[in-house]
Amino acid sequence: MPTPIEFRAIQDYYADDFAWCFGCGRLNDHGHHFRTRWDGDETLTEFQPEPDHIAIPGYVYGGLLASLIDCHSTGSAALALYRRDGHEPGDDAPVPRCVTASLKVEFLKPTPLGAPLAVRGRILEMGTRKVRVESDVWVNGDIVVRGEVVAVLAPDSMKPRPSTS
């Protein structure tokens, strides 16, 4: 179950049909529940890896770190597009849902298991439907992973179709 809401994360406002992602979906009982918010001009996701997020003893599995970069960056893109349109999480306007068009991940240092992770993102470029985001994973004061994501608004083909029954 997700932790109590202490801040307004963009994922808390995704439409139900777009809230099932294993990384950031609030409706996925088995997911990680990554939550992304503004922190000044940057975006922030904080996450505590569990003992089973292991690669080798003492270190976090790289796939989890790539997932964290991915979901943090698409959440950052949604925040940026929402703010550009004059909204903040909690407004009544529908929240944009972005998906990943491109994901690049660089593992700079081994990531120790047991310490909390903080992902900080910056918007590098924003178009009408596309946002380029750079995100760094920090642990114990060090950047351990850097990623760049091109996120795009979810295409119409991914949107739910009305029932015809």
Image: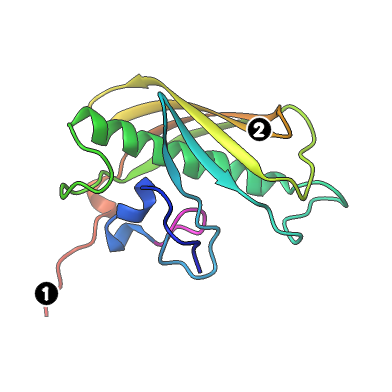
Residue in the image at 40% along x and 66% along y: 27
48 lies left or right of 111: left
Q: Residues within 10 Å of mark 1 (few under 14, many from 20)?
A: few
Task: Compare residues 105 and 111 and report the one nearer the observer.
Answer: 111
Residue named by callout 2: 138
For residue 15, which quarter of the picture?
A: bottom left
Coordinates of residue 71 in the picture (x, y in percent): 48, 44
Residue 78 figure quarter:
top left
Q: Are marks 2 and 1 in contact (CB under 8 Å)?
A: no
- Element on which disc 2 rests: strand
- Left or right of 53: which side holds 124? left
Image position of 154 with respect to 110: above or below: below
Q: Which quadrant would residue 125 be assigned to in this image?
A: top left
User: Of marks 2 and 1, which one's residue comes earlier in the chain?
Assistant: 2
Assess disc 2: are there few (<14), some (14-19) or many (≥20) residues with their C-alpha within 10 Å of its C-alpha: some
Q: Magenta span covers which residues? A: 20-25
**Vertical side of 57 occupied by 119: above or below:** above
Q: Can residue 152 be seen in this snapshot?
A: no
The kind of residue on which mark 1 rests is: Thr
Q: Is residue 161 above or below residue 138?
A: below
Residue at image mark 1? 164
x, y percentage for residue 95?
24, 46
Q: Main secondary structure of the magenta part?
A: loop
Q: Residue at x 25, y 36 (%)?
A: 82
Q: Position of residue 29 (x, y in %)?
A: 49, 70
The answer to whether residue 33 is seen in the rendering is yes
Residue at horizontal 11 percent and vertical 80 percent from the top: 165
- Front: mark 2 or 1: 2
